[in-house]
Image (tube, rainbow, N blue to C red):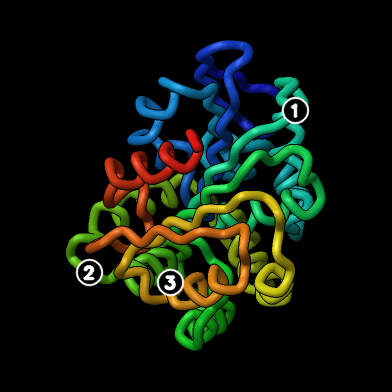
Amino acid sequence: MQFKIYMLHYTTYLLDKDAPWVTFVHGAGGSSAIWFRQIRDFKKSFNVLLVDLRGHGKSKNHVYEKLKQYSFDVIGDEVIEVLDHLRIKQSHFVGISLGTIIIREITERHPERVSSMILAGAIMKLNIRGQILMRLGILLKSVIPYLLLYKLFAFIIMPKKNHKASRNLFVQEAKKLYQKEFIRWFTLAAKVNPLLAFFRIKETPIPTLYVMGEEDYMFLPSITKLVKNHSSAKLEVVPACGHVVNVEKPEAFNQIALNFLNK
């Protein structure tokens, strides 16, 4: 069932009114379409909610054009607004890439709404290469076409031959963004370091599973270190897999995630 009202666009798959909910949050430049290989398996046991973040997928509204800057708390509130509208008191959350930051931010201000978190391709620290990449992007974001910049970023984050399907999917979704929208999200991501530092220090009691690709060289080392210091967090590493685990290895991702949720 799909709805289009003045809030984020969302899609639901209802199993039963008493079944637990799982809410999927995509990353920057993507859309809820990136979860198409999860829906069939998850809807067998859960009510499923997919959201398109502002400016992405079908969440395009002229109101966003008036907003010069975005913040993670406002974006998180827009996700909570959808839960409120659907009268979902609590949900499991599954996120990918930048979506994991949004989910983690929601847990800080609305912990009672989050049953557990599955954070795939999680971003909790930018390594030196990532910081150089962001600085380069800041210099070039208004000079070169955003799609060219996005393709460059996608290739650096997902460089291997077996990452090609993930790169192509994200580039196809990114084509649906506008230049101004891309710049707003990029500016948001470029300022994320203080928030990530806080998340690395502040442990949440909410059960958390990190699902990372073995070849996610930019983000896996920091998650490995974080999990050693956070007792409520666990890490599953998927072999021969890059950043976008749910696209590259959907069967493995679904099995790992559902095993975690069913416990």
- Residue 239: x and y in percent read 25, 62
SS at badge 3: helix
Q: Which of the numbered marks, if any, corresponds to residue 89?
A: 1
Q: Amino acid at mark 1?
A: Lys
- Residue 133: x and y in percent read 48, 80
Query: Residue at point 38% right, 52% down?
Result: 170
Q: Nearer the viewer, residue 132 or 62?
A: 132
Query: Residue at point 47% right, 64% down?
Result: 146
- Residue 213: x and y in percent read 34, 62
Crowdedness near tag 3: few (<14), some (14–19) or many (≥20) residues, C-alpha within 10 Å: many
- Which residue in the protein does label 2 denote? 160
Q: Which of the numbered marks, if any, corresponds to residue 5?
A: none
- Residue 15: x and y in percent read 51, 14
Q: Amino acid at mark 2?
A: Lys
Crowdedness near tag 2: few (<14), some (14–19) or many (≥20) residues, C-alpha within 10 Å: few
Q: Amino acid at mark 3?
A: Leu
Specify which label sits upstream in the sequence, 2 or 3.
2
Q: Which of the numbered marks, if any, corresponds to residue 220?
A: 3
Mark-to-mark CA distance, 1 and 3: 32 Å
Query: Residue at point 66% right, 55% down?
Result: 104
Does residue 203 lie above or below 119 as drawn? below
Specify which label sits upstream in the sequence, 1 or 3.
1
Does residue 177 lie above or below 153 as drawn? above
Crowdedness near tag 1: few (<14), some (14–19) or many (≥20) residues, C-alpha within 10 Å: some
**Residue 21 occupies quadrant:** top right
Residue 237 visible? The answer is: yes
Query: Residue at point 30% right, 70% down?
Result: 215
